Amino acid sequence: MASVKPPQSQGDSIQKKGGRRRDENNRIYANPLPITFSQVENKFAVTALGIFGISAARVLNPRCEGVFDPATRSVWITNSKDSMILWRHGFFGKGNLSRSEPSWLVRQINIRKAAGKQMTSEEVTAKRRAERKQFKLDRARAIAAAAAEAEAAFAEGRIISAEETRTSIPSAATWKPTPSIRNAVTPPSERSREEIDDLDAEPLEDLEHMQLTLPEAFFLAWALDSWTSSIPKRYGHAVYACTANVYIFMQLEPMALPDIWRAFQAAHMPLHLEAPLGHGHALRPDNPFLVNYVFLHHYRSLGWVVKNGVKFCVDYLLYKRGPIRPGSFPVYDDPEDAKSSPYNLPNVAPFTWQWLSTINRVNSQVQKTLVLSYVTIPALSRVSSTKISSPACFEEYSVREITIRRFVPARMRD
């Protein structure tokens, strides 16, 4: 007797499709750092080296290249190949024309050829925001209508059951977007044929570059040795020209690690403290670059992906399996150094209980964990000018962290 295969439901197909997408993402983003290891295919050599405790794996370092821009305090990665390596192997940097991943060129190709069938992250976000906005409007309209109906029923002496009221007000599970909302992000297929032909006639050029923060760039250059930097030849002067809003550096020269160390700190110095790159007398342990790098190095070493948290009103955002919002608090080892500091470091002053209660309540509403990270800045008396001129000064810093959870009596009675 032949067996009949049961029909595949729509939920099963969606689940399999999501599983394939998840497996593909796991394959693409499998490496947490740009450094990868390749195995030798010769099994005899692997066995022979294993006898002596020697690994046959080879270390592959991409050696990406970037340009240091003092004006924006960032490093520009203009090579698209290097940008994808740094993004897919550790989620370093962001595209200057995108929310996170450099996807401007992909969006333009999608407009021309994909006919809206494949949506980028920016397009998906715009669609979700439009649907969420319309859901709130429909729910408010339904609540107002239900309230008016209840008042009319009360005036007439009628009684409205709870089931009727519940069914009239849409919820997130029952509400369906209207066709007008689904088309809020207009797909390219609905554009006129003339517009598509005009776009196809123009040559497509990638105008996007990746921007690395200075702590990210130094982590790649010093901790991983995966990045080399160039700098405008006349540091501190206008040596780059602007053509059609695209900055082109005219003369570049490679930077050694000591030059990167001094240049990144000089980018944060006030104008009256800026010194030539060859001098280190103006370097201080409370330089914002050093404080931010200590924080980034600490959590990167623990396996976290550290991103800027300005859109969440915090200093940084940590990603591993879920988002965590840490706030960075510099702590001076010697309080007198804070009085003489030329830097206006944020979160140095003690916070109030009202601020802590507010931010803790907000984090509980958005289902994120709040971490208070305290970076202890060594005293000037303990750090010599020779030590502050090299990364050896990092051993004087320390990081303490406290996880904050809001107490909810209804959930924590036991």
Image: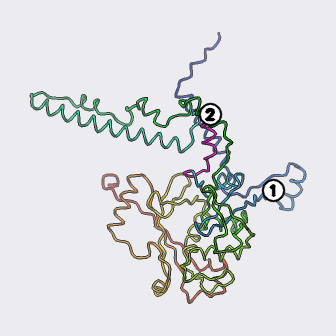
Q: Residue 225: x, y in percent? A: 73, 66
Report the amino acid beneath label 2: Ala
At horizontal 20% and vertical 36% (from top left) the residue drawn is: 147
Q: In which image quadrant can residue 164 be found? A: top left
Q: In which image quadrant can residue 69 be found? A: bottom right
Question: How dense is the environment of label 2, judged by Cα within 10 Å: few (below 14), some, or many (20 and up)?
Answer: some
* Element type where label 1 sits in the image: loop
Q: In which image quadrant can residue 32 be found? A: bottom right
Residue 114 - label = 2
Nearer-N-terminus badge (1/2): 1
From mark 1 to mark 2, how far is it between C-alphas? 41 Å
- Outermost residue on the top side: it is 1
Q: Residue 404: x, y in percent? A: 42, 63
* Chain part drawn in magenta: 98-112
Q: Which residue is mark 1?
A: 57
Q: Is residue 78 left or right of residue 187?
A: right
At horizontal 65% and vertical 36% (from top left) the residue drawn is: 200
Mark 1 or 2: the one toward you: 2
Q: Is residue 16 visible?
A: no
* Element type where label 2 sits in the image: helix
Q: Residue 107: within the magenta?
A: yes
| Image quarter of the N terminus | top right
Q: Is residue 267 left or right of residue 65?
A: left
Report the amino acid beneath label 1: Ala
| Image quarter of the C terminus | bottom left
